[in-house]
Image: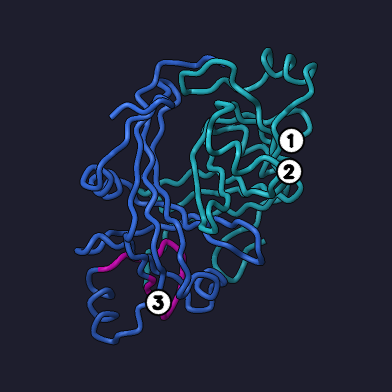
Chain colours: A cyan, B blue
């Protein structure tokens, strides 16, 4: 579907396929009443939730555990002025179940940051929206 | 400065140099009490504020005009697990001064979306923070 604004809306399946292509996305949350954003590497779990691995001491964990956050990933090409973006919105929570934590130690994302005793955070994919820009414009 | 979490903090000058390298960033704002994020192409003005060009009818304009938003840009390389991110936080406002609008029609960013009668939005760079990850870890 081509929208009025020149973007094509992507369905959930397309969104998940694109999300699986990129290693880094951005967690969007509220911090001290201000909009805040932090890029992180991630993976998708079997149920399509977004998984992060971070330090248990990270400010991010305190800020988002139990909160509704947005998670965004995209890819754009300046040469063709085209690309896509996907936003997952849902509740974030630290994985506290020991068996689940063990499973993610084997199969979950590995942090790009040096850390010990990392914790996993799951963002439920309650809402997924995406759009594609096919490019070739560049007008005011 | 290498922080405890493995990132090096970037100073304002480094942040602005990196921001100038990339064509697309992400506006982070609050929409219906939920965190929201939208990628846009942008340019930096002479005073280091972030400039966007968008449709006057865009929901984004209504949501951010007069509000404090975050604007994020980054570049990461999965092969080396390294990269940088910069966040500008400041008040966003539609450029309403006709002379300023005329100047931006000449020198400002051009939208990648097809549109007529685009409006410019300026995000003041009241706070700029950035960090660099030098990579090569990948542990839990």
- What residue is shown with label 1? A48
Question: Relative to B11, is A82 above or below?
Answer: below
Q: Main secondary structure of the magenta part?
A: loop
Task: Name the quadrant containing residue A57.
Answer: top right
Q: Which residue occupies 62% across, 32% down?
A: A20
- What residue is shown with label 3? B94
Residues under numbered marks 3 and 2 in contact, where contact means CB atoms less than 8 Å apart: no
Q: Position of residue A110 (x, y in %)?
A: 57, 20
Label 1 SS: loop
Seen in the image, is B117 located left or right of residue A89? Answer: left
- What residue is shown with label 2? A125
How many numbered circles are shown?
A: 3
Q: Position of residue B80 (x, y in %)?
A: 39, 20
Quarter of the image with the C terminus of chain B in it: top right
Residue that protrudes farthest toward the bottom in the picture: B98
Question: Relative to B40, is B16 above or below?
Answer: above
Label 3 SS: strand
Task: Same chain for labels 1 and 3? Say yes or no.
Answer: no
Q: Position of residue A59 (x, y in %)?
A: 53, 37
> Chain ID for label 1?
A
Quarter of the image with the N terminus of chain B in it: top left
**Does label 1 or label 2 sit earlier along the sequence?**
1
Seen in the image, is B2 located left or right of residue A31? Answer: left
Question: Relative to B30, is B10 above or below?
Answer: above
In the image, the segment drawn in magenta is B108-121
| Front-most of residues B127 and A50 | B127
């Amino acid at each position: 579907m081509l929208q009025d604004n020149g973007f094509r809306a992507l369905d959930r399946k397309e969104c998940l396929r694109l999300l699986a292509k990129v290693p880094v996305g951005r967690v969007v949350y509220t911090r001290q009443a201000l909009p805040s954003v932090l890029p992180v590497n991630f993976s998708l779990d079997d149920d399509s939730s977004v998984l992060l691995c971070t330090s248990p001491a990270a400010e991010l964990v305190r800020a988002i555990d139990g909160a509704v956050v947005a998670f965004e990933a995209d890819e754009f090409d300046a040469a063709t002025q085209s690309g896509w973006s996907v936003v997952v919105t849902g509740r974030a929570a630290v994985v506290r179940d020991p068996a689940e934590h063990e499973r993610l130690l084997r199969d979950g994302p590995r942090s790009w940051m040096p850390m010990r005793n990392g914790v996993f955070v799951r963002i439920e994919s309650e809402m997924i929206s995406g759009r594609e820009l096919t490019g070739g414009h560049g007008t005011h």
